[in-house]
């Protein structure tokens, strides 16, 4: 379909239909008939370019593509397009996958896992049926997480991995967030370090690398990273922290979110898979191991 300053025109070639923008700020197509196949109603913005495919069997426009050629044509069982005055052959076995006109793109797939939609669930793992792992980010109505493609393990023909929580995902309602108690004294005279003293034994309650917070006006405020513990004291590095704790404030901590990952919690799980490979990649299906959450 060709859009110019005064008209719409186009033709179908091997089931594909091309659309190119002209000089209008926007083009409104309302109750027009395209090759006798029924009415369409859309508004196209000049700043956006679309490539659509027409399916002759469905008599509709089922797909959008991200590449925007100047012209397209199907000929001798091959698909060709023009860009910048150059001729390109699509679907070539010798070309890089997802490379259009010299620009390399990333493949992405988004879906939702929504079994038992009225129950809060724990989503523990993710499995891919295919010939290669993908990077994966997940988002529920309560939490977020991700899986690096290098974390997947191939087991019985499927790629399996645990869902890790996002590194900066500080959820104070999670089990990885716990209270310690009120400090009896705070010594901030040590360079880059703050020494907090309590009137009880800390023991193994906290670990080096945990994030420390002081509760100010019922709001947890980050004060530093735990660097050492000895009996009744905790040493933190407060470099870059927005506040310095004072004696008598209630202290709490959050463990390393990745190390303490237990998956993602929520009613549903939205996932986005991305793959930047330039080689042949197939993906047949995805699945997640989940169970009902009992708080």
Image: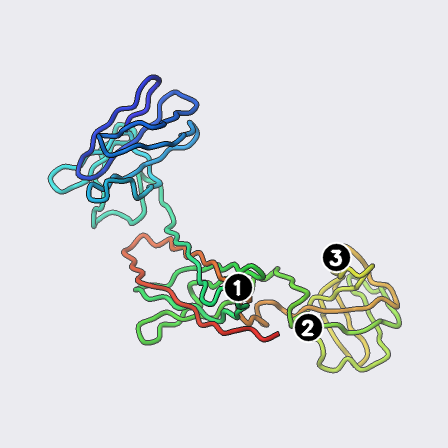
x, y (%) of residue 141?
A: 56, 59
Mark closer to the chain start, 2 or 3: 2
Q: Looking at this view, is 35 or 75 the one in front?
A: 35
Tell me how far mark 1 sits from mark 2, CA to CA: 33 Å
Residue corresponding to mark 3: 241
Residue 208, disc: 2
Q: Residue at x 55, y 64 (%)?
A: 266
Q: Residue at left 58%, top 61%?
A: 142
Q: Quadrant of residue 113?
A: bottom left
> Mark 2, residues whose alpha carbon is within 10 Å: few (<14), some, or many (≥20)?
some
Give the SS element for disc 2.
loop
In front: 30, or 238?
A: 30
The residue lying toward the viewer, choosing from 81 and 142, is: 142
Query: For the residues carrying marks 1 and 3, which lies nearer the camera in this image?
Result: 1
Among all residues in the image, which is located at the extreme top? 6
Q: Are marks 1 and 3 in contact (CB under 8 Å)?
A: no
Q: Which disc, if any, is residue 267?
A: 1
Residue at (60, 67) in percent of width and height = 257
Residue 200, image quadrant: bottom right
Considering only order in the chain, which callout, 3 or 1, is on the residue closer to the N terminus?
3
Q: Quadrant of the C terminus?
A: bottom right
Which is more toward the observer, 11 or 79? 11
């Amino acid at each position: 379909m060709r859009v110019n300053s005064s008209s719409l025109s186009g033709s179908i070639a091997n089931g594909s239909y091309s659309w190119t923008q002209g000089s209008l700020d926007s083009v409104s197509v309302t109750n027009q008939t395209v090759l006798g196949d029924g009415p369409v109603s859309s508004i196209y913005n000049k700043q956006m370019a679309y490539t659509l495919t027409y399916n002759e069997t469905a008599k509709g426009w089922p797909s959008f593509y991200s590449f925007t050629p100047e012209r397209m044509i199907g000929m001798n069982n091959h698909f060709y397009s023009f860009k910048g005055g150059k001729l390109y052959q699509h679907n070539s076995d010798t070309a890089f996958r997802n490379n259009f006109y010299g620009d390399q793109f990333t493949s992405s797939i988004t879906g939702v896992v929504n079994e038992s939609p009225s129950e809060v669930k724990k989503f523990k793992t993710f499995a891919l049926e295919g010939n290669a792992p993908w990077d994966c980010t997940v988002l529920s109505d309560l939490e977020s997480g991700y899986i690096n493609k290098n974390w997947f393990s191939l087991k019985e023909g499927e790629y399996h991995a645990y869902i890790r929580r996002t590194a900066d995902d500080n959820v104070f309602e999670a089990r990885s967030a716990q209270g310690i108690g009120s400090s009896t004294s705070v010594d901030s005279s040590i360079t880059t370090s703050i020494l907090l003293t309590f009137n009880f034994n800390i023991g193994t309650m906290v670990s080096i690398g945990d994030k420390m917070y002081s509760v100010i006006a019922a709001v947890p405020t980050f004060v530093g990273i735990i660097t050492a513990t000895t009996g009744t004291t905790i040493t933190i590095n407060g470099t870059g922290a927005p506040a310095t704790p004072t004696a008598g404030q209630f202290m709490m901590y959050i463990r390393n979110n990745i190390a303490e990952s237990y998956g993602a919690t929520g009613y549903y799980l939205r996932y986005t898979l991305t793959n930047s490979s330039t080689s042949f990649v197939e993906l047949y299906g995805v699945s997640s191991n989940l169970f009902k959450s009992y708080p």
